[in-house]
Amino acid sequence: MFRQLVTPGHPGPILSPVVMKNINSLFIYHPLQISALIETVWLNRNNATGSQTSYPFVPWSPLLASQILNAPFFAGYDWSTTPPKALYPPSPYTSPIDQPGIKNTWNGVGVGSPPQPPAGSLIQQTNWDHLIYAYVIENTRIFEIFSKVLETYMFSEQLETPSPASQQFWRNVEFLIFGDAMPSMLWTTSSRLRRDEVADRLTAYYWMFGIDLSHAQDIAGQHPYQKPAAANRDFVPTFEAFAREVWRGIVNAKNFSGANDTDPTVIATLARRIYDMMATRRINGNLSREEFRAVAIMSFIHLAVLYDSPAVVDLKATASSPEMRLQKIAERVGMTAHPKSKPFFDLAGPFSILMHSIETGTFNDTVGAQTLYSQIAPNFPARNAETVIDQYTLATGRDLKSQAVSVVPRATTSRLSAPKRQVPPPQLAATHGNGHAHTPLKQ
Amino acid sequence: MAQREPNEVNETNEIVVVQTPDPAEQALQQEIAQFVGFPDSDQKKILANLAQLHYSLRGPEYLLDKGNYSRPFPQTGKPTQTTGAASTGVHKR
C-alpha cells in the first residue's frame, strides 16, 4: 500500500531523488498523519463497489482525513526569534497531501446533499498489493528482524543512538505496527478477541493459500494460531500447475519450429480454479481489512530497506540491495535473514500483480489466457508471468520450467491364463489297519 | 517546441533520454507477428485493462537508482594497459 502511495505517476530516469524524498517524508510523519493517509487510501479504493467481493467497510470521512493531511504538523518553536518560528521538517519534504498515491483527493466539501465530489474533480483511484505480497515479504523474516531491532533500541544501548530521522521512523514502527491501533481506524484488526496480530496474519495466509511461513515453526510457539478448516489447501499445487502451463506457452511462443504443446484451455481452467478459491474466501469483502493491514505493514518496512534509508544508515547496514541491507540489519541484532531473501524481494511485486490479474477473471477463458504468454508487444503480462516463474523457482526450489511428470500405469490387455495341466490325484499312502503309515524297513 | 535528440543534454546539464521507436525492432515485431498473429480487438481490450492494473500496482523499486554501486569502465580515448589473459596483444613489447 505504501509502495503505491509514494510512487510518482510518471516514471523516468531522474526520479530517484523524488521517490526517496517521498519515502523519507513518509517515515517522519506524525502517526496521526499516517493514519489519515491510510484511511484516505482505503476511501479512494477502486473496488468499493461493483462486485460481490468488493470491500464494504467505511473509513474516516474525507472531511476529517483531509483536515489532518492539510494541517501543519511541526516539532515545536524556535524561541530565539520574535515571534517564535515553527520548526517544520527540513527540506526536501513531501507533505502528506502531496504524496502521489492520493494526489487530488477530495476534501469532503461538495455540492448537494449528501455532498458529492465536484464536477471536474481529479480524484484518482487507489489500489494496493495482494496478500501474497505480504506473505512473500514476511518470508524474508523482515518483520521479526525489525521487531528485534526495535526491542534492542528500547531496552539497551547495544546499538548506536539513532539520528532524529531514524528515531521518528522507529516511533512510527512502534506505534503503527506494534502498538494498539485506534479502534476507529479501518486497518485495526486486533482486539481483545484476537490480540496477537502475527498469529492473525499466519491464519490469513493459511486461509488464502493453505501454507505457512517458512519460519512458522520458529514463531508458532510465541504466536499460536488457528488453521481454518475451509482453507485453500489446493492453492500451491494448482498455482504450480498453472505456472507450468504458462511457461510452456512462453517457450512455444518464442519457438517457431517443433511441436507446440501450449494449451490455453488448461491455463484458463487452472486460472478459473485459483479465481474461485480466492473469490470464495473474499465474498462480501471478507478478509479485506486483514489483507490491507498485512500489506500496509510489510510495505512500510519493505520501503525502509529498498534504499539506504536513515534507519539503514544508522544501523550501519548500507548495501547495494534490499536483501543485503536486511541481512546486515539482522546481523546487528544476532539474527539472520532468509537465505532466499533476494528472490523473495524480487517475487513479491510481480506475484501480487499476477494474483490481482487472476482475480479479475481475465484469464478464465482462452482469449485472456493467451495474453499470459503472447510475445507480441505489448507483452507485459507475459514478462510479468515469466518473472514470477523465475523467482518462484529460485525461492522455493521447485522447478516450474520442467514439465510435470506423472506415473501412469500402462493399459494392457488381460493375460491369457496358462493351460492347466492335468495333475494326477495324489496316491494315498499305504496304511496299516491301525491307521499308522507304513514305514519301510531299513536294509 | 523543438524535438529533442536522443540523449541530448538539456539546460540543467541533465541527459534527456528520449525513447524513439527503433525501426528495426518494429520490423522484427511485424515479422514475428506473421507467425503468432496480432492481438485482436478482444485481446487489445484485455491488455488495456491489464495495463491499468499493472500501473495501479507499480512500486518504487524500479525508480530507485541502483547504478551508483557499479564499477566504472576504463575511460575511452586514453591508452590503457592490459595485462594477463585479458590482453588483446595489440601493445608492443
Image (spheres, coloured by chain):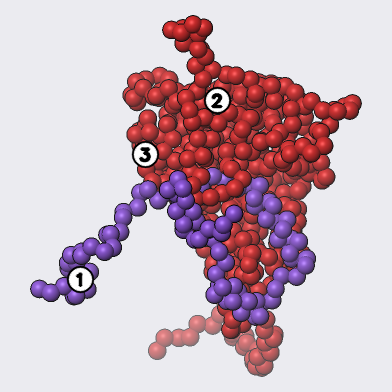
Chain colours: A red, B purple
Q: Residues within 10 Å of mark 1 (few under 14, many from 20)?
A: few
Q: Where residue A394 sits in the image (x, y, percent)?
A: 48, 57
> Where's the C terminus of chain A, which quadrant?
bottom left
Chain bearing mark 2: A
Q: Position of residue A347 (x, y in %)?
A: 54, 52
* Depth check, front residue: A196 or A142: A142
* Amino acid type of the residue tagged 3 in the rendering: Thr
In the picture, the disc for residue A318 is: 3
Q: Quadrant of residue A432?
A: bottom right
In the rendered view of the protein, which quadrant contains the N terminus of chain A? top right
Q: Position of residue A408 (x, y in %)?
A: 63, 74
| Point 52% across, 29% down: residue | A93
Q: Residue furthest left?
A: B93
Amino acid of disc 2: Tyr
Relative to A91, say whether B15 is above or below: below
What is the three-letter code of the residue carrying label 1?
A: Ser
Residue A325 position (above or below residue A311): below
Residue behind mark 2: A29
Q: Is residue A215 left or right of residue A109?
A: left
Marks 1 and 2 belong to one chain: no
Instruction: Please give the residue where the numbered disc 1 appears in the rendered image.
Output: B87
